[in-house]
Amino acid sequence: MAQLWGGRFTKETDQMVYQFNASISFDKRFYAQDIRGSIAHVMMLAKQGILTEEEQRKMISGLEGILRDIEDGSLAISEKYEDIHSFVEATLIERIGEPGKKLHTGRSRNDQVALDMKLYIRDEVYATDHLLKELLEVLLGIMEEHIDTFMPGFTHLQKAQPITLAHHMGAYFEMFKRDRARMKDVYRRMNYCPLGSGALAGTTYPLDREYTAELLGFAGATWNSMDSVADRDYLIEFLAALSTVMMHLSRFSEEVIIWNSNEYQFVEIDDAYSTGSSIMPQKKNPDIAELVRGKTGRVYGALMSLLVTMKGLPLAYNKDMQEDKELAFDAIDTAKGCLMLFTDMLRTMRFQKEQMERSAKNGFTNATDAADYLVGHGVAFRDAHGIVGQLVLSCIEKGISLEEMSLEEYQRISPVFQEDIYDAISLKTCVEKRKTFGAPGREAMEQVISLQKRYLSQS
Ligand code: ARG
């Protein structure tokens, strides 16, 4: 046991209590942020004349030495300390003596942990955004390559209208683009420095909080010292944004699983990203996609846990808030791992163009276009809908597609049909004709692809 307090205690802490209370096993993860925050704090204390130049020099070189030694493995973070803050402070005192004892001047672990967590999360928001960008780059590559790859678009998982693979991927592009915007938003709102808020009521030392904030790359200092140590909104927002990323990845995974099935065969997952069965030799399972779908629940769970943890807390700091760390770290590791693996799986996945096109043909996805053909020849849409419904029924009875039906049969149901119906319902025409901005037609798609390219080059 090694703790920072003890003066007013007459008994040693019970060993079990100590273990229950300690956080070093998980907060050691942000040792670098803790040291970085301490260095900024020392610089500010010196600027304000609270520390001498000499003390500042010794303390900063001591802190830098601790960071270097942890990083190169020569200094192990000992779990006999209660938390990472105590470990760093005690190590500094051990290494430089008296000046080390001044490190905690005008500071509490409450504002210190608030700072460390913010610094850590800020980096993770940035890293997540980067991973999302990589995924978008892979998506854009597929979109460019498959602008003419026809496939069925679905509603209710029933074949609906023909689209292209580029268009389908474009839908996911939009989702992950919004996820990036959410990351930016979380970053912008959280980027205020809590250090200098003390335990809850500020300090009596003449701290320059704006200076510390500036040294640490924040947009400014937080405006209320109680809120500073009690706020975990930014973490809730980040976990909510990560949950949305996971929801998107999970929907995408679900489609990959369906597309990879024997019945669909729209895609083939690369051997490196699928797994076999111990008993059924023919199997090639989409485990990565299934795990991504499964792990989504875990990230939602972290969001729920933190919301519930926070809901009854009076101001300001309460130890309950220590619970934010393990669940946030797990959710962040999970979401980042999923993003990385999913992106690699997608990059190496093969799309079976012929099979997708065959499926679009066999599913009457051009039925709306056949009705539009009639409307173009003066038939009211409601009547056209009924006529094409009869056509579809007769195709189903014969086990053929609309393209395979003879002109005589078309004309038996409606004399309006002429030879050009075949061109009107070809997949190429059906897609080409959908030219509205945001639709799958080539021109519209090319326009969107160039906009997405510009977006990626600018953000
Ligand atoms: N380990 C604590 C946490 O994660 C650090 C702050 C401790 N403050 C305190 N007053 N005990 O929240």
Image (cartoon, rainbow, N blue to C red):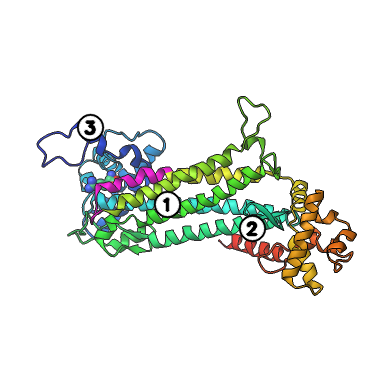
Using the numbered discs, state the Cα–Cα distance from disc 1 to disc 3 in whole angstroms. 31 Å
Q: Is mark 3 within 8 Å of ligand 1?
A: no
Which residue is label 2 attached to?
170
Q: Nearer the viewer, residue 104 or 19?
A: 19
Q: Quadrant of residue 195?
A: bottom left
Does residue 327 show up magenta in the picture? yes
Residue sitting at the far top: 279
Indicate the secondary structure of the residue bearing disc 2.
Answer: helix
Instruction: Please provide percent x and percent y for residue 297.
Output: 46, 45
Say if residue 432 shows up in the picture: no
Give the side of residue 175 with respect to residue 188, left or right. right
Q: Nearer the viewer, residue 279 or 378?
A: 378
Please name the residue shown 23% across and 51% down the image.
Answer: 108
Which residue is label 1 attached to?
239
Between discs 3 and 2, the one toward the N terminus: 3
Does residue 36 show up magenta in the picture? no
Count up the numbered dots.
3
Using the numbered discs, state the Cα–Cα distance from disc 3 to disc 2 in whole angstroms. 54 Å
Amino acid type of the residue tagged 3 in the rendering: Met
Please name the residue shown 61% across and 28% down the image.
Answer: 277
Please name the residue shown 35% across and 49% down the image.
Answer: 306
Between discs 1 and 3, the one toward the N terminus: 3
Q: Which residues are magenta?
A: 313-330
Q: Residues within 10 Å of mark 3 (few under 14, many from 20)?
A: few
Indicate the secondary structure of the residue bearing disc 1.
Answer: helix
Query: Quadrant of the image for the N terminus?
Result: top left
Which residue is label 3 attached to?
16
Q: Nearer the viewer, residue 160 or 380?
A: 380
* Main SS category, magenta section: helix
Verify CB contact (< 8 Å) between mark 2 and mark 1: no
